[in-house]
Image (cartoon, rainbow, N blue to C red):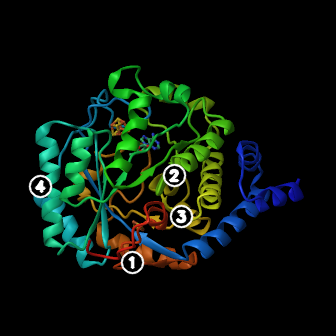
């Protein structure tokens, strides 16, 4: 078996069967996958880890995803939208502390007023940072026009997780209606590419009804779509969601964590030059989960810059970490943690996806566009 794993890892291109075998290895043999991924990472992207200061802009969402704590159907959530000044303060903090980039994430809204408000915000962030802060958006499915407008206002990366690349599984995780449509989500990913973003997607790992075969297909989906960035993490149940009723059918949290580690490592192996995030959900299941993810392939981390008073209201899942820590507490903590795991923070560097530049033939810019 061990030799078999080694042989598979030496192949130039892993197919679905290979991926299923690798995803099914026990924790001991998984170390072979981790070692290979660490090697690939070192060779292709080095040991730098890039900060993306995360601002959770609003928890108001028109969608009702069955897994998510801030779904519109959850009436227990106090809804908020940050004031412009609060976002700008976070941007100034990121800029002053050499984060180089930020991510603005929000529940999905698409009213003209919302679209415009985000556009204005982007313009202001660019202005206060002399054009130097890189901005990633994560605001769900929007029209081509909106994507283009936000791109022109200064956003240059976009995260839109496919959540589950299998249409059948996707359907089990979302209401069956027009705003939760699988094909439309795929279309949105294509529009993001078309409008010139570095495009990131991802899935949740350890979902109810999900099998290893689905996860192998997810990896192949990423490769076929030729993505620039990925963010994946374990599924974590939330009491006030419909999927909570399946909590007894889930694999254990430890298994979900290990499976997430394997997904990160395998993605690094099959798409060696993309950016991969060490996600907060990984830290939820293991106190050093993000650092472990960095060791096996991740190279991006998203320290939370949302004002602490709002964080309780952005709980997509249970036990989310760093809820009480001010942004300034996290910097030193994270820097030390990353160092301990052999990484080095790329302060002041955008750390764009190398894959994007290869894919588009553009020349890499470090800061101002
Ligand atoms: N567990 C883990 N991740 C979740 N997300 C939403 N709900 C959960 C959950 N219960 C993730 C989704 C979404 C991202 C913002 O948070 O993948 O894209
Ligand atoms: Fe809204 Fe995103 Fe939660 Fe779905 S996962 S309900 S789109 S915030
Ligand atoms: Fe937030 Fe350590 S990363 S306190």
Between discs 3 and 2, the one toward the N terminus: 2
Residue on which the image places disc 4: 120
Residue 86 spot, x, y in % from top left? 15, 60
Q: Residue at x 22, y 44 (%)?
A: 146
Disc 1 Cβ-to-ligand 3 distance below 8 Å = no
Q: Residue at x 74, y 55 (%)?
A: 27
Q: Is residue 114 left or right of residue 221?
A: left
Residue on which the image places disc 3: 298
Viewer-nearest of discs 4 and 2:
2
Label 1, label 3: how far apart the Cα atoms are: 19 Å
Label 4, label 3: how far apart the Cα atoms are: 32 Å
Q: Label 4: few (<14), some or many (≥20) within 10 Å?
A: some
Compare residues 334 and 14 and report the one nearer the observer.
14
Between discs 1 and 3, the one toward the N terminus: 3
- Give SS at disc 3: loop
Viewer-nearest of discs 1 and 3:
3
Residue on which the image places disc 1: 332
Residue on which the image places disc 2: 226
Task: Say if mark 3 contacts mark 2, CB within 8 Å.
Answer: no
Between discs 2 and 1, the one toward the N terminus: 2
Residue 234 spot, x, y in % from top left? 54, 46
């Amino acid at each position: 078996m061990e030799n078999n794993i080694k042989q598979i890892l030496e192949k130039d291109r892993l197919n679905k069967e290979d991926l299923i075998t690798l995803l099914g290895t026990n924790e001991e043999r998984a170390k072979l996958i981790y070692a290979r991924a660490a090697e690939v990472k070192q060779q292709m992207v080095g040991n730098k880890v890039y900060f993306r200061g995360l601002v959770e802009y609003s928890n108001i969402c028109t969608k009702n995803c069955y897994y998510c704590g801030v779904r519109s159907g959850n009436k227990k959530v106090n809804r908020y939208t940050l004031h412009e000044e609060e976002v700008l303060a976070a941007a100034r903090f990121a800029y002053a502390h050499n984060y180089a980039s930020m991510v603005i994430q929000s529940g999905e809204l698409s009213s003209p007023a919302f679209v415009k408000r985000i556009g204005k915000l982007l313009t202001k962030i660019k202005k206060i940072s002399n054009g130097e802060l890189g901005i990633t958006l994560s605001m769900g499915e929007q029209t081509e026009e909106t994507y283009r407008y936000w791109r022109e206002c200064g956003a240059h990366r976009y995260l839109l997780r496919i959540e589950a690349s299998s249409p059948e599984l996707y359907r089990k995780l979302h209401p069956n209606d027009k705003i939760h449509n699988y094909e439309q989500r795929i279309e949105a990913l294509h529009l993001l590419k078309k409008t010139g973003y570095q495009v990131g997607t991802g899935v949740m790992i350890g979902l109810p009804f999900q099998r290893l075969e689905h996860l192998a297909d997810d990896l192949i989906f990423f490769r076929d779509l030729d993505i620039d960035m990925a963010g994946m993490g374990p599924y974590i149940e939330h009491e006030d969601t419909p999927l909570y009723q399946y909590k007894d059918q889930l694999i254990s949290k430890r298994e979900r964590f290990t499976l997430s580690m394997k997904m990160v490592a395998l993605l690094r192996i099959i798409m060696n030059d993309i950016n991969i995030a060490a996600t907060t959900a990984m830290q939820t299941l293991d106190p050093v989960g993000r650092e472990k993810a960095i060791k096996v392939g991740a190279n991006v981390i998203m320290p939370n810059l949302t004002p602490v008073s709002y964080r309780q209201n952005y709980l997509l899942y249970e036990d989310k970490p760093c809820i009480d820590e001010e942004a300034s507490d996290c910097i030193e903590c994270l820097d030390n943690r990353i160092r301990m795991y052999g990484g080095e923070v790329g302060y002041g560097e955008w750390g764009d996806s190398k894959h994007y530049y290869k894919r588009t033939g553009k020349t890499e810019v470090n800061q101002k566009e």
